[in-house]
Amino acid sequence: MLFSLFFLSRKESPIISENQTKFTDFILLRFSEKPEQQGTLFGLFFGMYLVTVIGNLLIILAIGSDSHLHTPMYFFLSNLSFADFCMVSTTVPNMLVSILLENKAITYVNCLAQMYFFMVFGCMDNFLLTAMAYDRFVAICHPLRYSAIMNPSLCCLLVLLSWIISLLDSLLHTLMVIRLSFCTDHEIQHFFCDLAEVLKLSCSDTLMNYILIYILAGLLAILPITGILFSYIQICSSILKIPSARGKYKAFSTCGSHLSVVSLFYGTGLGVYLSSSTTYSSWKSTVVSSMYSVVTPMLNPFIYTLRNKDIKDALRKLISRTVSSQ
């Protein structure tokens, strides 16, 4: 009896490994568009990608070329623009190529890489927005100590910690996915390899993956949101104590752009969560996810440019220097 059980277990293991080794590709269903809609979809996302890349790169170049913008607020903004540029470059180019080649397949390795880097840059946005909220809190609530508190060492440390935590968080999730097996259904109801969608396809036990997601989401999402809310409660309290209306407006205008970006980032993120938990339409969920992963990085440069005189002046100087050099 023991020998027969041993023989059966030895006989079944090659079958399992054979099924796993046959698996090579995922199928990204994108928006499940019809053939006649692919041209429109390509043009729409190609346009948004160009605007996102050009807008974020211009902000990075403008901040780097103007010494007046070498301050903590703009240091964090340049890192935020870099993270947005990288996040959209992780997903959109692959989708554009797949539309051109009429091939929705993505290899297992490329899918894991896309999932990893998307989580890295999404997490970076989260921490950078928190660091920017702290910067505005110090600037408005402790203006006399601003230079001493927000020194270059602290700013670099905050960005470095953001990178380290983001990389480790994404690496942990990716390693937990690698241990899973994918046996039958390989169709992802999305236009990129999102962690939640990949887990739905696994025929292994994903309980530990979801426990890890909830724990890390609690630590790395709720804590930064709490920090941002605390900062703005203190900021509002300090602004209300300013006697003149002009002084109140001037103080609030320094954090208006950041507050708009925070509302857009967490608002669309909440929309993704609610749509995935309440709707059974994969198409609607994918559209909402595109708002978070593509539209938000595209709008951030416009928000900071339209509401910020310093950025406008720096962009004018950059463009004039570029034109005159030619």
Image (spheres, grey):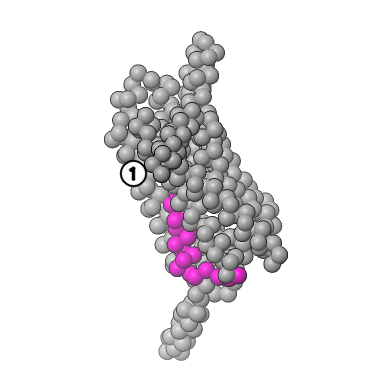
- Mark 1, Cα crowd under 10 Å, few <14 / some 14-19 / many 20+, is few
Q: Can you give x and y, in whole percent of width and height, for residue 29 in the image? A: 62, 65
Q: How many marks?
A: 1
The answer to if 109 sits in the magenta stretch is yes
The part of the chain drawn in magenta is 102-123
Q: Is residue 143 left or right of residue 246?
A: left
Image height of 157 relative to 85, above or below? above
Q: Is residue 299 above or below residue 196?
A: above
Q: What is the three-letter code of the residue carrying label 1?
A: Leu
79 in relation to 289, above or below: above
Q: Main secondary structure of the magenta part?
A: helix
- The residue nearer to you, when weighing 108 against 261, is 261
Q: Residue furthest top?
A: 243
Residue in the image at 60% along x and 70% along y? 102
**Residue at (52% x, 40% y) in the render:** 300
Quarter assignment of residue 77: top left
Taking depth in this image into account, of 99 and 159 the one nearest to the observer is 99
Residue 113 is inside the magenta segment: yes
What residue sits right under mark 1 in the picture? 160
Q: Nearer the viewer, residue 233 or 25?
A: 25
Q: Residue at x 54, y 33 (%)?
A: 306
Res. 17 in view = yes
Q: Is residue 311 visible?
A: no
Which residue is at the far left? Answer: 153
Residue 281 position in % (x across, y down): 69, 57
What element does badge 1 sit on?
A: helix
Q: Is residue 282 above or below residue 125?
A: below
Q: Residue at x 47, y 18 (%)?
A: 238
Residue 153: horizontal and vertical position, in percent? 28, 35
Q: Position of residue 150 (x, y in %)?
A: 34, 29
The C terminus - image quarter = top left
